[in-house]
Image: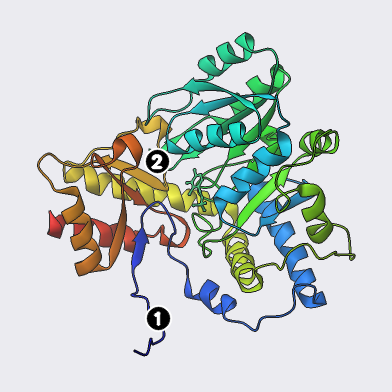
Amino acid sequence: MTICSFQPPRRTLMGPGPSDVSDRVLQAMARPTVGHLDPSFISMMDETKQLLQYVFQTKNELTFAVSAPGSAGMECCFANLIEPGNTVIVCQNGVFGGRMKENVERCGGIAVMVQDDWGKAVDPSKLEDALKANPDACLVAFVHAETSTGAQSDAKTLVDLAHQHGCLTIVDSVTSLAGTPLKVDEWGIDAIYSGSQKCLSASPGLSPVSFNQHAADKIKRRTTKVQSWFLDLNLVMGYWGGEGKRAYHHTAPVNCLYGLHESLVIVQEEGLQNSWDRHQRNHLALRDGLEKMGINFIVAEKDRLPQLNAVTIPEGIDDAAVRSRLLNEYDLEIGAGLGSLAGKVWRIGLMGHASSQKNVDFCLNSLRAVL
Ligand SMILES: *Cc1c(COP(=O)(O)O)cnc(C)c1O
């Protein structure tokens, strides 16, 4: 049997990620591969760093893309900042907070969990109680935009509380970056990670991260080696940092980085504030259409993420059947519920390039036809 070239169908991606990748980004990825130490590639990496500083709203020197998906950015933050025996407070209000706990424990840390209901924002007063009860804690971790539920937490307030109690912060911004206001320096976030495939609309496989001086100092003061060789920032920075003198660490995913660079150029052209506004505008249009159909949101209005709309599946409707009809008849992907919300909700993404009035109309019309 001869296996032929793979021809993927052309879908509209309105799930929890990946989001639609524009032709412009796809074309950038099809440009000739150069060596990863080629001078032209190195200047593209320098531009990528500047563009990432812009989308994160930071001046942090230690800002770059980990060569692997968002989960690796998560692991990079935890592996570098935790030393065995460290106490870490993890706020959980969905699936991804649970993964943070796993990371803390695998790094030899002690996780203190602060639990909130799924679909609610993290409650700052619960974090404050945990900080008072655990004076030895040195880190606080939370998810800014919980993709499993569509809830957004007040990152600035949580970071302020952590700092008042002498803790550094790790923030998951995989779904928030470029979709909803996020200001790393103004809010004082110490370590942050994101993903290329959500509101940046690049292909999956890269994880933008940024660390401030306090985080860098904690990493420098370590008395134990970072348990991951690949993610050890001291080694990675020899490649991404160090003006002009790059040392080989690993072979960067060259064409994938062309795509990220192009997607960041697109955000810069639009302007970050305009991108945030567009996400909000399309969210409101989708909300109005869904509510007219009697479909309701699971998150209270003030905590809703514009880029991830989690709605209750109407009574008597077969979840899987609807999603497979949308996929097969309309080439439209929407997301299923995760964890305790499986079978109860749909997650409709309006992320990055996929956040458009055209997609809102298409999704509403397709859903109406199928229901
Ligand atoms: C998607 C996502 C991740 C994981 O990113 P991958 O690229 O799938 O590894 C982590 N956290 C949140 C909040 C996410 O939405």
Amino acid type, callout 1: Phe
Q: SS for tag 2?
A: loop
Q: CA distance from mark 2 to mark 1?
A: 31 Å
Q: Residue at x 56, y 55 (%)?
A: 69
Residue 75 left/right relative to 143: right
Q: Quadrant of the N terminus?
A: bottom left
Amino acid type, callout 2: Ser
Residue 289 left/right relative to 101: left
How many neighbours does mark 1 have within 10 angstroms: few (below 14), some (14-19), or many (20 or more)?
few
| Residue placed most toward the observer, 241 or 2 | 2
Q: SS for tag 1?
A: loop
Relative vertical location of residue 136 with respect to residue 69 in this rendering, above or below: above
Q: Residue at x 61, y 32 (%)?
A: 104
State if disc 1 and disc 2 touch (CB < 8 Å).
Answer: no
Label placed on residue 6: 1
Residue 270 left/right relative to 86: left
Q: Residue at x 75, y 48 (%)?
A: 232
| Residue placed most toward the observer, 158 or 218 | 218
| Residue placed most toward the observer, 123 or 118 | 118
How many neighbours does mark 2 have within 10 angstroms: few (below 14), some (14-19), or many (20 or more)?
many
Label placed on residue 148: 2
Name the spot of residue 320 as percent of width and height, x first: 20, 52
Is the residue at mark 2 in contact range of ligand 1, meaning its CB lies under 8 Å from it? yes
Q: Earlier in the sequence, mark 2 or mark 1?
A: 1
The quarter of the picture where residue 214 lies is: top right
